[in-house]
């Protein structure tokens, strides 16, 4: 590595690809994004990553040889030992994609790959609100619901790399029937963005609300804050369901901190009501429920941190 050594952070999403070039301290030197809508083939995504990387290197005046390592996050179950994305959400539809080896072949640098929610937890641990907190859980509440778990300062992925798949958790009020492929899991159906949208559609009657029929989860929460009764009922239900999941995880992990992130999880009203419900059930340990300090950058900063760790191991 030379004095200009840098790392790449890659965040692969179902609709968007984000690439960041950072120095070895984690400072972002340049960043860009590209749509992945209608781009599902893994080889096409890798080609886009290479194009974005070349653009960033040109922007900052560095050669590709300045890249020390790459960290990449994918939206699905990922074998972190082999770098194979076992399965992603229906948005990507990947199965057994050897992403690590594909990126290493394309870029010529060492690569580490993990689940995107795990990387969000790593980002908060290294650069965000959880810095200095050895045990915490990052809750990504977006279209679905997932968790990234940090124990004793290290990511915990589980023996099958599915630790944190809490969207399928069974909590009070959810259906115990197994979720169909491409449909929200039991907890996701109550607290995730797609589940909330579908529930609003099923309950919506023009006689009981002045809000439109087609709303996103965050728009429903906005309506709740404005005083709409039907929207309030869905917000309360989502917060209570999430609080039950937090309570159960607290009993097992004894984590004192839960960080809400994701497009839905970052809504302040959800955080406030979830904390109240958590407090009502808390016993010896009363965990704090806070909003992500990195926001939408949590995943990309976690990918940068993963790149840093690989670079340090190779130095």
Image: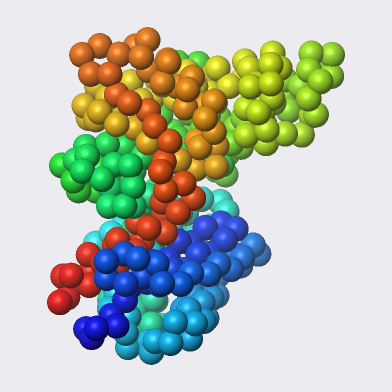
Q: Is residue 66 above or below residue 239?
A: below
The quadrant where residue 278 appears: top left
Name the foreground residue: 9 vs 145. 9
Q: Position of residue 106 (x, y in %)?
A: 41, 83
Q: Position of residue 16 (x, y in %)?
A: 57, 61
Residue at x-position 31% and y-position 64%: 26
Residue at x-position 43% and y-position 87%: 61
Question: Can residue 289 be seen from the camera position used here?
Answer: yes
Q: Position of residue 128 (x, y in %)?
A: 33, 47
Question: Can residue 84 be seen from the camera position used here?
Answer: no
Name the foreground residue: 189 vs 139. 139
Q: Residue furthest right?
A: 207
Horizontal relation, residue 313 to residue 68: left or right:
left
Horizontal relation, residue 99 to residue 14: left or right:
left
Horizontal relation, residue 154 to residue 218: left or right:
left
Q: Position of residue 294 (x, y in %)?
A: 42, 48
Residue at x-position 23% and y-position 18%: 285
Q: Is residue 157 above or below residue 41?
A: above
Q: Assign the N terminus to one quadrant of the image.
A: bottom left
């Amino acid at each position: 590595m030379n004095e200009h050594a840098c790392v790449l952070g890659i965040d692969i999403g179902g609709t968007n690809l984000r690439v960041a070039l950072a120095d070895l301290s984690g400072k972002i030197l340049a960043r860009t994004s590209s749509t992945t809508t209608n781009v599902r083939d893994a080889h096409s995504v890798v080609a886009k990553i290479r194009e974005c990387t070349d653009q960033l290197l040109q922007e900052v005046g560095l050669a590709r040889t300045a890249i020390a390592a790459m960290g990449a996050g994918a939206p699905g179950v990922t074998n972190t030992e082999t770098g194979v994305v076992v399965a992603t959400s229906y948005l990507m539809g990947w199965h057994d994609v050897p992403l690590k080896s594909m990126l290493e072949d394309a870029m010529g640098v060492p690569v580490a790959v993990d689940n995107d929610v795990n990387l969000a937890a790593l980002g908060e641990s290294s650069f965000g609100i959880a810095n200095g907190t050895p045990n915490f859980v990052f809750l990504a509440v977006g279209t679905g619901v997932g968790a990234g778990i940090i124990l004793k300062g290290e990511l915990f992925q589980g023996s099958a790399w599915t630790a944190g798949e809490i969207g399928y958790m069974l909590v009070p009020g959810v259906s115990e029937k197994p979720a169909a492929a491409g449909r929200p899991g039991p907890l996701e159906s109550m607290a995730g963005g797609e589940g909330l949208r579908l529930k609003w559609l099923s309950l919506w009657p023009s006689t009981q609300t002045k809000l439109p029929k087609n709303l996103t989860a965050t728009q429903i929460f906005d309506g709740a804050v404005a005083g709409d009764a039907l929207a309030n009922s869905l917000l309360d239900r989502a917060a209570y369901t999430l609080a039950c999941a937090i309570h159960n995880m607290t009993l097992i992990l004894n984590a004192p901190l839960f960080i809400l992130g994701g497009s839905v999880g970052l809504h302040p009203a959800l955080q406030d009501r979830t904390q109240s419900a958590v407090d009502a059930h808390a016993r010896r340990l009363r965990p704090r429920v806070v909003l992500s300090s990195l926001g939408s950058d949590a995943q990309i900063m976690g990918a940068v941190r993963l790149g840093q760790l690989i670079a340090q191991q190779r130095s």
